[in-house]
Image (tube, rainbow, N blue to C red):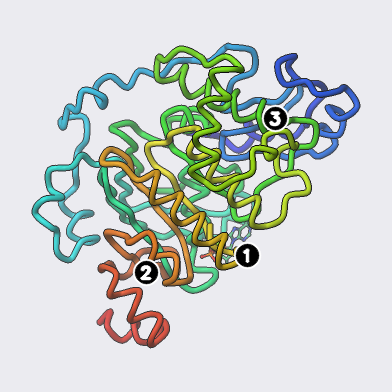
Amino acid sequence: MVSRSSFCQRFAAGVGGLPTSIRNGAARAGDVGRARVPVVAGRVQLREKGVLVCGEEVGSLKTQSRRRWREGSSSSVTVSTNAMSAQLEEEPAAKGEARVILEVQGLRAVVADTRQEILNGVDLVIREGEVHAIMGKNGSGKSTLSKVLVGHPDYEVTGGTAIFKGENLFDKEPEERSHCGLFLSFQSPVEIPGVSNMDFLRMACNARRNARGLEELGPLEFYGFVAEKLTALNMDPRFLDRNVNEGFSGGEKKRNEILQLSVLEADMAILDEIDSGLDIDALRDVANAVVGLKKDNNAILMITHYQRLLDYIMPTYVHIMEAGRIVKTGDMSLAAQLEAGGYNAVQAMKM
Ligand SMILES: Nc1ncnc2c1ncn2[C@@H]1O[C@H](COP(=O)(O)OP(=O)(O)O)[C@@H](O)[C@H]1O
Ligand SMILES: [Mg+2]
């Protein structure tokens, strides 16, 4: 369990200096310290001794053993029939074969400071190869769910379970969740002055490669690797020389999130309103990039208000969230009904 106090101790202090590998001028490193960004979903954390990218400071990465899951042992994942039947009204037969990547059961969470309950019994099962969309009115708890899954310190889990690739997610630190292949894109990505996008991406990539037992990529190899990703994303290579998100437009920040996702090769990506603030061309590019990242052995959970993103990405399931739980699950037609009749129409169907 990630305790809020240890989190605060670790992240509240900000940054006193940067590891040599990502140092980009002492003055700018000081700027990072003043920025005092507490935590970015385990991907980057600013703390006393430096910047932590995917939990790695100076090569002290702890390799996670995920052998059981890698070998595809179905016994490592217990699928609850209750959660399944609550979530899925009709299970396509072919999907029964795919391994469960994430199983959330009865998840309850409160705001750590006020003890206000936001999530009150979320059930969700996501298998490899699936794309799930969560829709729902503002304030229904969609972002809270995604932040709780990656271990955001503002929230405390008060009940339920989340099993990711056969392991208890809540036993892991946020950076360990990232190592394991869980990725959250942010509604408002943070700027990190003094850290170039290239250095950041390479560190993040290597931290994840380490966790998977792969060799690190040197600067040249990494350039080749990332150049392909940039092309696929229709992104200008000059992005790499700029500091992470510094001075980026809203659309550029969203593209940069997807670039990070593609470099990290996450097993499960949670995309929180990745379409917000995008113009039509940028939406198409970002959506196509996400489609390009879909594989048989990964999964996507996207949160959106609009059908236009779903038209590109074509989710396997669409869920409606209301008052901290998933109240309805269907396919794309549910999103179409929402678009046509609003949430009241769905409310009527719930009964
Ligand atoms: N850190 C927090 N402190 C206080 N209230 C919060 C916090 N996070 C979320 N909430 C409240 O929880 C509810 C759900 O928020 P959120 O998960 O952001 O909704 P959504 O993403 O569905 O719009 C809202 O009423 C919001 O104000
Ligand atoms: Mg939200």
Please name whichever residue, 137 or 268, is drawn nearer the observer in this view of the structure.
Answer: 268
- Label 3: which residue? 9
Residue 49: horizontal and vertical position, in percent?
A: 75, 19
Determine if the C-beta at disc 3 is less than 8 A from ligand 1. Answer: no
Q: Residue furthest left?
A: 93
Which kind of residue does numbered mark 1 sit on? Gly
Numbered disc 3: secondary structure: helix
- Residue depicted at x 71% and y 44%: 245
| CB atoms of marks 1 and 2 within 8 Å | no
Label 3 to label 2, Cα distance in Å? 36 Å
First-in-chain label (3 vs 2): 3
Please name whichever residue, 111 or 240, is drawn nearer the observer in this view of the structure.
Answer: 240
- Residue depicted at x 24% and y 42%: 100
- Rendering quadrant holding ligand 2: bottom right
| CB atoms of marks 3 and 2 within 8 Å | no
Query: What is the quadrant of the C terminus in the image?
Result: bottom left
- Label 2: which residue? 320
- Label 1: which residue? 277
| Quarter location, residue 122 | bottom left
* Mark 3 Cα shell of 10 Å, populated few (<14), some (14-19), many (≥20): few
Q: Residue furthest right?
A: 27
Which kind of residue does numbered mark 2 sit on? Ile
Numbered disc 2: secondary structure: strand
